[in-house]
Amino acid sequence: MNRTTLRTLIVATFALAAASCSGSTSSPGGGNGAGGGSHAGGACGTTASGGAGGASSACVAGPVLDQNAFGQKYKFADNELSGWTQATAADDPAAFDVYTSVDDLVSRIDGEADSYKGFRFAMFQDLMGPDPQTCNVVVMDFVTDCLATTEYTGQQGNGSYVIEVAGYDDSVAIVTTTLTGINVYAHFKALYIELQMSGYLAEDGSLDLNKAASAAAQFLAALKTKTN
């Protein structure tokens, strides 16, 4: 299966995953770039990071960065993870960008706008690994850890998660399978993260979950370090 076919499968699968969130309960927003919207999970100010209850004063704000600084902070340099480089302009003319509009973001990832309202900045990067592996990295700044947790817990209730990422329990990261890989949902501090990882078929055509989960752990470890 070539990269073009894989990218088509990624877009279709991710659209279905994002659409599953659109009918969920109201979540907070307002004043944080894109405003309020619909998403499952507790309201910000009543749910502290990691899912434990707490007052709004427990919410911790992330660093204040402008749009360009945010993108550069979380962008992966070529071979920062061995074998992974940003897609070329020929493969993807919009391989890297930072969004402030939810409509612009979802047009890039074919998501549902109501699933992502409330972020301040969202970085998208299209990475290509050892052929045929690919990874779309989406990192969203939700301003506080409470808002990021709310976004994450909305995904947490949307289906069966068949594997775990080594080193992370389901209060931090969860995984769904796709036709040729996995989608990873995670949160660190004020960040909400999604990874669309494809190209992880074994020789017999089955999904190589161990290989995909191992790669996901590398990405999450690197992103967690970037939050420091």
Image (cartoon, rainbow, N blue to C red):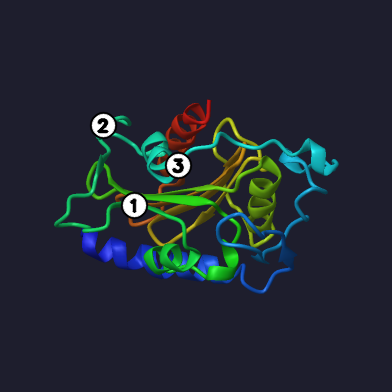
Q: Nearer the viewer, mark 3 or mark 2?
A: 3
Q: Label 1: which residue?
A: 97
Circle 3/circle 2 CB separation < 8 Å: no
**Helix, strand or loop for disc 2:** loop
Q: How far from the left and from the top, in percent, is residue 83?
A: 25, 34
Q: Which of marks 2 and 1 is in front?
A: 1
N-terminal label among 2 and 1: 2
User: Going by the image, does 74 lie left or right of 156?
Assistant: left
User: Going by the image, does 110 lie left or right of 127?
Assistant: right
Q: How far apart are marks 3 and 1 (CA)?
A: 14 Å
The three-letter amino acid code for the residue at tag 2 is Asn
**Which part of the image, by quadrant, shows the N terminus?**
bottom left
User: Going by the image, does 31 lie left or right of 201?
Assistant: right
Q: Residues within 10 Å of mark 1 (few under 14, many from 20)?
A: some
User: Going by the image, does 119 lie left or right of 206?
Assistant: right
Q: Residues within 10 Å of mark 3 (few under 14, many from 20)?
A: few
Q: How far from the left and from the top, in percent, is residue 5?
A: 25, 65
Q: How crowded is mark 2: few (under 14 residues within 10 Å), some or many (20 or more)?
A: few
Q: How far from the left and from the top, in percent, is residue 25?
A: 74, 68
Q: How far apart are marks 2 and 1 (CA)?
A: 19 Å
Residue that appears at 39% across and 42% down: 71
N-terminal label among 3 and 1: 3
Q: How far from the left and from the top, in percent, is residue 15?
A: 46, 69
Q: Residue 66: which disc?
A: 3
The three-letter amino acid code for the residue at tag 1 is Asp
Q: Label 2: which residue?
A: 79
**Helix, strand or loop for disc 3:** loop
The three-letter amino acid code for the residue at tag 3 is Asp
